[in-house]
Image: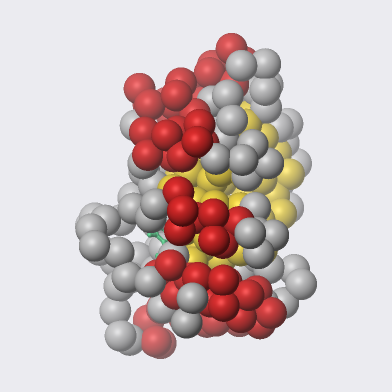
Amino acid sequence: MSIKENINSIKSELPEHVSLVAVSKTKSVSEIMEAYETGHRIFGENKVQEMTEKFEKMPKDIQWHMIGHVQRNKVKYMAEYVSLIHGVDSLKLLKEINKQAKRSQRTINCLLQIKIAEEESKFGLSAEDAKAILNSDSFKSFENIQICGLMGMATFTEDQAQIKREFQYLKTIFEEFKTFELPNYDIKTLSMGMSGDYELAIYCGSTMVRIGSSIFGARNYD
Ligand SMILES: *Cc1c(COP(=O)(O)O)cnc(C)c1O
């Protein structure tokens, strides 16, 4: 199937409360344009430089989501245009995002990444660490960021029961975090689910899925 057919068929199956981030990392501008021409506007990248190059070349009504791990020294390159940063995993990073957002006279939307997978390689905060960030004095002073939700990645495994447990755990944390009343904070988005597990993620309460290979085909590298 073509990129157009893939994205249209996935979108037709998604419940109304679930939004789609089309993950276009490693894909060319012309491949992304094929998805854009269906009317889709939300694209996800995991490298700041690659995303910025695409931002510069592509229509300006695209909402670019940074879904990868972010190095603090790269924040300045995307501060002007990034629509949502999914992988916030430290207070230091949040501080830098706030600083660069202020320079660009913007408010940048962020998700806190919670570690739910068992692999060491997957980034993210424990629920306790995330709470400590939210309760810190510096967090309250960050006027140019808005925390909109949580993000997580399940373990890369065939074991559906394990993936389900991890998604359910994140959903439980999400419900708890929704009850907090804080400045710069309005939690509505639960970003979980990729090509291999998004149906399960939606079943477990996801409101935003990040889908790459099921739309654009396999990647040559990551
Ligand atoms: C690459 C990536 C995805 C998409 O993966 P697919 O399996 O190709 O759908 C989703 N989320 C993150 C954080 C990624 O890096």
Residue drawn at x 68%, y 41% is 61
Residue 42 image point, x, y percent? 61, 53
Q: Work out which residue is located at the far front of the displayed protein and give it.
A: 30
Residue 82 image point, x, y percent? 56, 35
Asked whether, in this view, residue 83 is left or right of residue 55, the answer is: right
Residue drawn at x 45%, y 58% is 31
Is residue 193 visible from the viewing direction of this image? no
Which residue is nearer to you in this view: 204 or 42?
42
Residue drawn at x 37%, y 39% is 50
Residue 107 image point, x, y percent? 67, 27
Which residue is nearer to you in this view: 5 or 206?
5
User: Which quarter of the rendered picture does the C terminus lie within?
Assistant: bottom left
Which residue is nearer to you in this view: 181 or 157?
157
Asked whether, in this view, residue 19 is left or right of residue 86, the answer is: right
Coloured how? Answer: secondary structure
Residue drawn at x 52%, y 82% is 200
Which residue is nearer to you in this view: 18 or 96?
18
Above or below for 95 versus 178: above
Residue 173 image point, x, y percent? 57, 61
Classify the position of ligand 1 by quadrant: top left, top right, bottom left or bottom right.
Answer: bottom left
